[in-house]
Image (cartoon, rainbow, N blue to C red):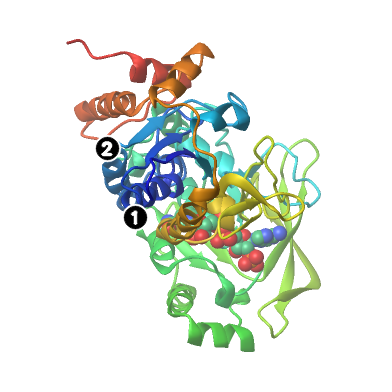
Amino acid sequence: MDRPVRVAVVGAGPAGIYAADILTRAAPAAQVDIFDRLPTPYGLIRYGVAPDHPRIKEIVTALHQVLDNPRIRFIGNVDYGVDVKPEELDPFYDATVIATGADRDRDLNIPGIGLPGSFGAADFVSWYDGHPDAPRDWPLTASRVAVIGAGNVAVDVARILAKTADELLETEIPDNVYQPLLTSPVTDVHVFSRRGPGQVRFTPQELRELDESPNVDVIVHPEGIEFDDASLATIRARRTVKMCVDILQNWAAREPRGRARRLHLHFLQAPVAILGSDRVTHLRTETQQLTGDGWVRGTGEFTDWDVQAVYRAIGYLGRPITDLPFDPATGTIPHTDGRVLDLDGDQIPGRYVTGWIKRGPVGLIGHTKKDANETISSLLADLRTLPSASYGDPADVLTYLSRRDLDYTTWAGWQRLDRHEIELGRPHGRKRVKVVPRDEMISISNTADAP
Ligand code: NAP
């Protein structure tokens, strides 16, 4: 490539940061601005990974090194498509890569889903991770709770609900999360998988962690531990599924240990209704039977579970972006090899997509690197056909944002907020305590340190 290339990446989570890294390595003259609607970088790592998963949160160390590259700028607190329209930013860049992820709950269309006491996992995760746009208060008033889904988000939600507040006190949770957990009356958390143990989407390490709290008994109800031919084939073919099945069978065979809180795992129970007149009083499930192909059908046998709260953890969806095509069924932006396609299936010049908004919310964080490689290869292959950015000076876009009165944050600003949060944790022997209100985050980020 013989000319400088200027690229906007939208979304400062792992997908966007990996794309910026791959691009700046492949094209030594490339300059990248990473925009985010939040004042902070790291997306899902900061606001999706559970606080008691410090090992996964450590991925920020590598992402920090990428953002330290002087050819990459972080521009936070700017909501692409809302604060600035795509066409407003276009003149500053040769191309735009959308990496906005998937952060809202997939719908579950069963009667009673709108009752008070019925929650989406994504909203709960945002609350316990101190997301600035999540409500500050969460009604942790239920003693018996249902969690629907057999993926790692269901595991996260069930674990956070069942653990005691003091087990989480060493983490970065803010006070508005610690206090309700401290007074939570929860005794029983029931996790429901509509299929069998051979179809779980948990990963073994995450499943095993459920059993690590000294205050929680994990109880696997043996009724649903069944396998059809497809289940046996999956167990033979996939080591991680076999590991999960072994763990579940061990747990199903042991006696409860008499702990104060219990976390129950039920298989072959599909949710059919949430019951209650003015708030949740029960979850109704229908017992399922395996059909030989790994899927299930209802048996007509129903159970009403006495619970006061229901959390659905049945998968995430991406959000549409103004003026860009969007597939509402999958929550993704249509593309070929990362090139965004319009409604006729034609490529939209200069628009690319990567991460969960490209392939849907599946896979672990590392998998996004493969996506980013494909997308950046497409972008670089197209480069000669794209019109060059018309603004010459990289400072121009910042001037434009200031003129639009957008209170954007920067990489230096994040480093100030980062230090502030670490200082908040220090007197209590904690690694950090998160700042939650958006205006406070911006004010700390944008107030220069005294010389
Ligand atoms: P997921 O892995 O796709 O699991 C969704 C679960 O919801 C599945 O068990 C699915 O069952 C169930 N489900 C879907 N529709 C349902 C319905 N109508 N009724 C009942 N159950 C239904 O999604 P996720 O848990 O949101 O996780 C998203 C991604 O993030 C995954 O790749 C996950 O591994 C990753 N993640 C990783 C970690 C970690 O590494 N610690 C933590 C959180 C998330 P069926 O299989 O029957 O459809």
Q: Is residue 69 left or right of residue 312?
A: left
Element marked by disc 2: loop
Q: Residues within 10 Å of mark 2 (few under 14, many from 20)?
A: few
Residue bearing mark 2: 68
The x and y percentages for residue 144 are 59, 48
Q: Write the residue at 42% across / 69% down.
A: 204
Element marked by disc 1: loop
The mark lying in front, picked from 1 and 2, is: 2
Hey, what amino acid is under mark 2? Asp
Q: How many labels were placed on the picture?
A: 2
Hey, what amino acid is under mark 1? Pro
Q: Is residue 226 left or right of residue 344?
A: left
Quick check: can you spot residue 258? no
Q: Is residue 328 left or right of residue 264?
A: right
Q: Is residue 95 above or below residue 78?
A: below
Residue bearing mark 1: 214
Task: Report the front residue among 193 and 188.
Answer: 193
